[in-house]
Image (spheres, rainbow, N blue to C red):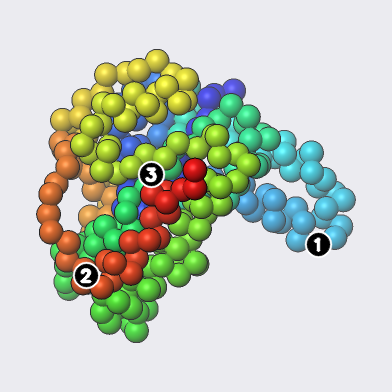
Amino acid sequence: MKSINFISGLPRSGTTLLSTVLNQNPRFSASISGPAARMVRAIVTEAQAQGGYRIQCPEEKRRRLVKNLLHTYYEDSNPVVFDTNRGWPLMTALIRDVFPESKMICCVRNIPWILDSFEQLLRKNPYSVSSLFSTEESADVYSRSAALLRPDRTIGFALNGLKQGVYGGEHDMILLVNYDDLCLKPKEVMQDIYKFIGEPYYEHDFNNVEASYDEFDKDVNLTGMHKVRKTLNHQVREPIIPPDLWHQTEPLSFWHHEPN
């Protein structure tokens, strides 16, 4: 069996960047967001959709189906796999049971900067209406931010799932990677990741990480969502979201306030 690991975390926080860097290693296969997590969830859900299904597909069979699904999905991949999806932290107990050696890298970034990043993208696409928002939600920065933070939407879903994973019983399989750290000190962060997953370090080229995934951007009609610049560096700029919205959402960055 290939060594399988997982990438998750918050949007606009470096998951695409991290996958692109990891793919420089010829032993690694790292995806940006893919359907495997939904497939796994479907096995668990549909096997219990009706009472008789639970008898025909008992728990041990579901476990084998999940394991074989990921085996098959990555049968043509490199020896070390990283599957990306924001839903994986909701399934840490399942992952620990099926793949006990697996690790999960979760990318984080201060919530106000995530909202600000979305607003920057919208400014770059002034003649497009993103499917991320309804007509009413797209009216202004406040309604857009509120929509993104809803529990069933882009940021809120990822944030709640991340909190469940971090504070759950399998928290030791999760490594939080701060977006700013990845940009400011990429080699140090990547060395930490390699140590965490138990792989020998590979010398990455942080000046040649350019990539784009236009097919994903077209789905939400927001160009540039999955574009990675050629050189990995930290860009200093002023935020464009209003100060009151910044202060209101800053406490949501829970990893800064973990109890001792």
Asked whether, in this view, residue 2 is left or right of residue 137, the answer is: right
Q: Position of residue 133 (x, y in %)?
A: 35, 74
- Please provide percent x and percent y for residue 27: 40, 20
What amino acid type is highlighted by mark number 2?
Pro
Mark closer to the chain start, 1 or 2:
1
**Residue under pointer 2:** 243
Q: Residue furthest toward the bottom?
A: 136
- Lower sequence index among marks 1 and 3: 1
Image point (13%, 59%), residue name = 238
Q: Is residue 145 left or right of residue 38?
A: left
Residue carrying label 3: 107
What amino acid is found at the position of numbered circle 3 in the picture?
A: Cys
| C-alpha distance separating marks 1 and 3 | 37 Å
Tell me where residue 106 appears, x and y as whole percent.
Answer: 43, 42
Would residue 127 be found to the left or right of residue 66 on screen?
A: left
> Which is nearer the eye, 7 or 134?
7
Looking at the rendering, which quadrant does residue 50 occupy?
bottom right
In the picture of the structure, the residue carrying the numbered disc 1 is 50
In 3D space, how far apart are the residues under numbered discs 1 and 2 (Cα atoms)? 50 Å
